[in-house]
Image (cartoon, rainbow, N blue to C red):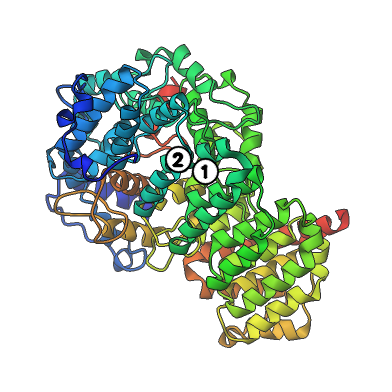
Amino acid sequence: MDWDEEEMEVAVSQRPEWSDVTPVPQNDGPNPVVPIHYSQHFAEVMSYFRAVYLADDRSTRSLHLTAEAIHLNPGNYTVWQFRRVIIEALNADLHEEFRLIEYLASKNSKNYQLWHHRRWVAEKLGTEAAARELEFTKNIFLNDAKNYHAWSHRQWVLQNLGGWEDELAYCNQLLEDDVFNNSAWNQRYFVITRHPGLGGIEATLDSEVSYTIKAILHRPENESAWRFLRGLYKNNMQSFVTNPKISTLCLNVLTSKVNPVFALSLLLDLISNGFEPNQDLKNAIKAVIPESNSEDPDISVTICAILEIIDQMRQNYWRWRKNNLHSQVAEGVANLYIH
Amino acid sequence: MWDVNELWMQFEIMILNKGESILITFPKQFLIGESCLIIMGELAAEQHAKYILTIEKKKDDVESVLMEHLRINGAYWGLTTLDILGKLSAVDQETVISWVMSCQHESGGFGGNEGHDPHVLYTLSAIQILALFNKIEVLDIEKVSSYVATLQNEDGSFSGDKWGEIDTRFSYVALCSLALLKKLYKINVEKAVRYIVSCKNLDGGFGCTPGAESHAGQIFCCIGALAITGCLHHVDKDLLGWWLCERQVKSGGLNGRPEKLPDVCYSWWVLSSLIMIDRVHWIDKEKLVKFILDCQDKENGGISDRPDDAVDVFHTYFGVAGLSLLEYPGLKAIDPAYALPVDVINRIFLN
């Protein structure tokens, strides 16, 4: 037993195994800048911790005390660090750490120290830990699918301990639960670009484009999916401009009378890279705000004018796009020739 | 023609007169057209300063136990806020400085409190606090900068302490510390920059490690580090600028990632990034000012993450610093890369 809720109710000074230790209280000075109000129990535990830390007492009782101190304040990295020193000295069972971490994670999973400790344990255990670590983060995502620490840990596990096999399927599952989950879209990109067996973005382009188009048609106001689609073509402008699926997607979104901001923005990108919209598409663009009745021969100007109106909070951005259309087109076409 | 500077000057006069009413009649469009007039007088600056100066008296503050290990961060947030509000002189600097120095470890790095292990995060806070008081010279600069330099890894990244956690936050913190100490030459800047650039994502943003999701806090760190090293040309400014301005939600507040709730802290992370890449005019500044002001506890001082939540020193700093970036009248200007008042930065680099 590493720490015990009942034992924590007994003052450290009343426990027989601590009778030989003199506690070292915190010195906050006479006029502290950010004075801290310590609860009595916390102050006592920390005083005993300072005593064993200063004496470098790498014993079982110190190990228990670190758990108690961590329990009271999981953010104190000096305590975590000393715990690792003791574990190494005593060759303590690493699996015990999972119990502590999982208990703390259930209270607050956004603590840097907790994740750092988890990684230290996983690294020591090696590939045998991969499945357990993937499962652990999966459990965190059940309650908080965008937990930044857990995603960071999961990426580290995949890259260092393995377990890539089902990762794309896992992304599918998360996006099925919530198609707006930007962390899952990011993970998807991570998988298709770094999975050792998928062949990279070139090999997965067609299936990823189809997948993303479907996701966009389901919820066209989803910023993450549009950015993912654009990212797939980051280094491949030629196919971006020539793939009819992309312009058809924009046409479908525009004609379905849903939030058109991202479709219009993508069209602007397409056009500035040399794409020439057909009459159907031009009509659909103008139909977004029929009363505006823009007669500008340059359809990009019309797109920007519409965006300025429908996305008022960012009107300066769209105005800037409008004022820079020509340089963007010139740059885009030049890029096409280079490719 | 309406002159913004003149209008602001008149407001500063009002503030200097401590609210004594001076009747100035403005044309109607000032009240509605730019809507800034109504907003301007609403920062409860006195109360915020008082809140920071009297945090110590809040004995029932349950957060305080959890702050114990990062007390030096708390001191940096509180003191910088006071300086922006023009109230730093209310603090006894000798006491602060001797306490800060007592947090230094024999390695040269600083802990979050006396007797704690050193970490690069707290080392930067210590340097920043000393910079506020124009007392960087009390440091053994060679020793502190050597501590920071030893945290650089072979691939250019930085660990937070000798135990090895790697994160672009630490790249920023290390580069900012060394720049303030004028010791950037002690590390391999080119490799440090290369590592940061390797964390760039398809949306133009940056994450904590290569492949990690873009997050406004990490973006601030990466853009700040690139600004400090003169390497902003690695940033896709238009792409990132659009992503950052997409962070503004209907209430006017900013979030840190798509589909997340707005939070006053992003008024700092997002705004400072937009300023460093010269795209801050792409957001609706007035709506953001209003959002921050709505998060104030006007009676007792302090600012919270969202309207009607509990205030804390962290969000008070980010709210006031955000307003400073938005050129709110009566506040000192803050430098978006170094997170210190501009006059402090000028004192270090121009003198």
Where residue B257 sits: x, y (%)? 49, 58
Q: Chain of mark 2?
A: B
Disc 1 residue type?
Met
Residue sitting at x 65%, y 31%: B155
| Discs 1 and 2 carry the same chain letter | yes
Name the residue nearer the viewer: B43 or A73: A73
Q: Quadrant of residue B37?
A: bottom left
Asked if one can make out residue B332 in the rendered structure from this viewpoint, the answer is yes
Instruction: Tell me the element at label 2.
Output: loop
Residue sitting at x 21%, y 30%: A33
Name the residue nearer the viewer: A200 or A33: A200
Mark 1 is surrounded, within 10 Å at the Cα level, by few (under 14), some (14 to 19) or many (20 or more) other residues, namely some
Mark 2 is surrounded, within 10 Å at the Cα level, by few (under 14), some (14 to 19) or many (20 or more) other residues, namely many
Residue sitting at x 38%, y 15%: B139
Asked if one can make out residue A37 in the rendered structure from this viewpoint, the answer is no
Where residue A142 sits: x, y (%)? 47, 63
User: Left or right of B179: which side holds A67?
Assistant: left
User: Cβ–Cβ below 8 Å for labels 1 and 2?
Assistant: yes
Vertical arrangement, residue B177 with respect to residue B222, above or below: above
Vertical arrangement, residue A180 with respect to residue B74, above or below: below
Residue sitting at x 58%, y 86%: A257
> Looking at the figure, which quarter contains the C terminus of chain B?
top left
Vertical arrangement, residue A128 with respect to residue A53, above or below: below
Where residue B207 sits: x, y (%)? 56, 47
- Which disc number belongs to residue B336? 2
> Looking at the figure, which quarter contains the N terminus of chain B?
bottom left
Q: Say which residue label 1 marks.
A: B276
Q: Chain of mark 1?
A: B
Where residue B88 sits: x, y (%)? 24, 31
User: Left or right of B70: which side holds A217?
Assistant: right
